Image: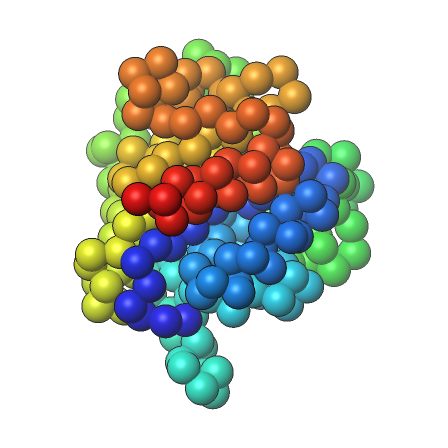
Amino acid sequence: MKNNSKYWIVTDLDGTLMDHNYDISPAKKTLNMLSDISIPVIPCTSKTASEVRYFRNENGLTDPFIVENGAAIYGTNIDNSAEWELILGKNYNELRIIMKNISKEVSYDLIPLNDLSKNQIYELTGLSGDGITRALDRHWSVPFLNPPDEIFEKIRFICDSFNVHVFKGNRMSHLLSSESHKGQAVNKLKSHLHNKEVKIIALGDSQNDLPLLEYADISIVIPGKYGPNKHLLAGIEKGSFILANAPHAKGWSNSVENVIKCLNDL
């Protein structure tokens, strides 16, 4: 990755670059174009490092990546000889203990992804085999089944006392350290690579992308099949966020190409 890049594409994966069948084919041409003009594409996702390594290998990406909703950052040395790691919060075992205590506080049994059977995980995510193994290789966050809205609000209310916070994604919720979120992770990566002046073009589709979209210089919301996530509507209505013209990889590709064209015309 070139540290002197003027722009970074920082993108969520599930529901943003890929659809819920994990297809990114409509964006392949745009990804190749970005590689040709040396604009980094940095995944910033709730996925694990194992999942993103696999995704990068499958799609020819080589830039750093942010995992588990901003709880850790990974990259490789210029010669690809070794991988480096930046950690922004508590580890998985600490968070599991905190989750158990929160469950007691709200009188509701929160069920982590890692406690589900393989069949249950398949029903929830569509993953199987090695895909499940990679998804369960968690180190810095705890995904759990979405509780009812009133329980989720109770959890949010007491999170500060445990120095954690929660995000609700499309498939499940996530518990992580209060120091960990996608926007903070991007800021940390800029410092690590000594490129504080780089402009961030961010793309996301869900509530857990809000810290990233609020941090970015150009923020693009990718809608779902039935429109944008309700938690991102305020930013769209204020004009802070751009709404893509199609869901998933097609909307991602169209929006990125439009932004790059506008930047080149300046």
Q: In this view, does 84 lie above or below 255?
A: below
* Residue located at (21% from left, 68% from top): 194
Residue 6 appears left or right of 55: left
Q: Is residue 206 above or below residue 42?
A: above
* Residue located at (30% from left, 58% from top): 6
Q: Which of 207 and 112 is in front in this view?
A: 207
Q: Where is residue 149 in the image (x, y as percent from the top left)?
A: 47, 14
Q: Where is residue 129 in the image (x, y as percent from the top left)?
A: 79, 56
Q: Nearer the viewer, residue 251 or 192?
A: 251
Q: Position of residue 14 (x, y in %)?
A: 59, 41
Residue 49 appears left or right of 54: left
Q: Is residue 180 above or below residue 73?
A: above
Where, by quadrant of the figure, is residue 160 drawn?
top left
Q: Quadrant of the C terminus?
A: top left
Q: Is residue 174 among the parts visible in the rendering? A: no
Q: Is residue 233 among the parts visible in the rendering? A: yes
Total numbered badges shown on the rendered structure: 0
